[in-house]
Every structure is written in C-alpha cells, then in structure tokens.
Image: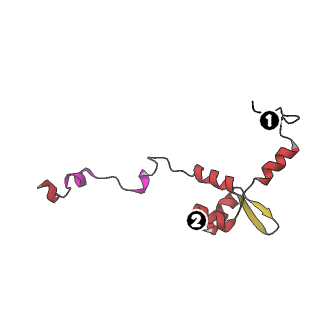
Amino acid sequence: MMPEEPTRAGDDGATSPEQRQASYDEIVWLSTLKAANRMGITTRTLYRFIDRGDLPAYRFGRVIRLRLSDVDSFVEQCRVEPGSLEHLYPEARLSDLDEVPETADDA
C-alpha cells in the first residue's frame, strides 16, 4: 500500500502566501527583443502593441519585460478566423473560371 501524500494546512482552495510565491517563481520573463522574435515582429511593432494596451508589459527600472504566458495568449487572440480575409483578395470572376487553360493531361 502506498503512503498518502501529506496535506497542507489550509488546503481549502485559497491561495496561501507560499503558493503565490511559488507561482511568481514560475514566471518566465522575456526581453522585448526575445518577445518580438518569438512573435516574428519587430520591436517597434511590439512597443506599439504594448503602448496601445494590447499586450501587457512590465517596467523594472529602465528594462521592459513581458511574461511568456502573456505573449502566448496574445498570439492566440490574434488568430485569423477562416473567411475573414476575403476583403484582401479580389473575387474570382466567373469569366476567369471559364477560361482555365487546358493541360496536357486534358487533351
């Protein structure tokens, strides 16, 4: 028989100071350059997202850092919905579809 895991005092779902400290220790911080590289954008674009309030960032003195989890959440929020880009390409004209060139296989 396996021994039971010890229970913590106050294990009622409330967050204790020790648990909060542990979660702060688990934060992965990114520099603005690393965050921009992760997103595939320039730092200038990243600063614009931060300044508009689209992406949370933290200033520690002169240094700006971003949480990895915030960057990943922002990326997921930017996901393009299928069918939402029709305005970016012209509609195919029916006459264009009728004039499809024949290939050697069709002959």
Reading the image, the residue beneath label 1 is 5
- Which residue reaches farthest top? 1
* In the foreground, 18 or 49: 18
Question: In terms of image quadrants, where is residue 16?
Answer: top right
Question: In terms of image quadrants, where is residue 61?
Answer: bottom right
Quadrant assignment for the C terminus: bottom left
Question: In terms of image quadrants, where is residue 65?
Answer: bottom right
* In the foreground, 41 or 22: 22
The amino acid at mark 2 is Ile
The amino acid at mark 1 is Glu
Question: Is 61 situated left or right of 50 in this image?
Answer: right
Quadrant assignment for the N terminus: top right
* In the foreground, 75 or 91: 75
* In the foreground, 26 or 51: 26
Question: Is 33 situated left or right of 14 in this image?
Answer: left
Question: Residue visible at 79% across and 54% down?
Answer: 25
Reading the image, the residue beneath label 2 is 41
Task: Count every numbered label the image shows and give the total.
Answer: 2
Magenta residue check for 100: yes
- Label 2 Cα crowd, 10 Å radius (few <14 / some 14-19 / many 20+): few
Place of residue 93 in the rendered image (x, y in percent of width and height, measured from the top left) = 28, 52
The answer to whether residue 59 of the structure is visible from this angle is yes
Place of residue 106 in the rendered image (x, y in percent of width and height, measured from the top left) = 14, 54
Going from N to C along the chain, the mark reached first, 1 or 2, is: 1
Place of residue 103 in the rendered image (x, y in percent of width and height, measured from the top left) = 17, 58
Looking at the rendering, the stretch of residues picked out in magenta corresponds to 86-103
Which type of secondary structure does the marked residue at label 1 adopt? loop
Magenta residue check for 51: no
Eyeballing the image, is 62 above or below 93? below
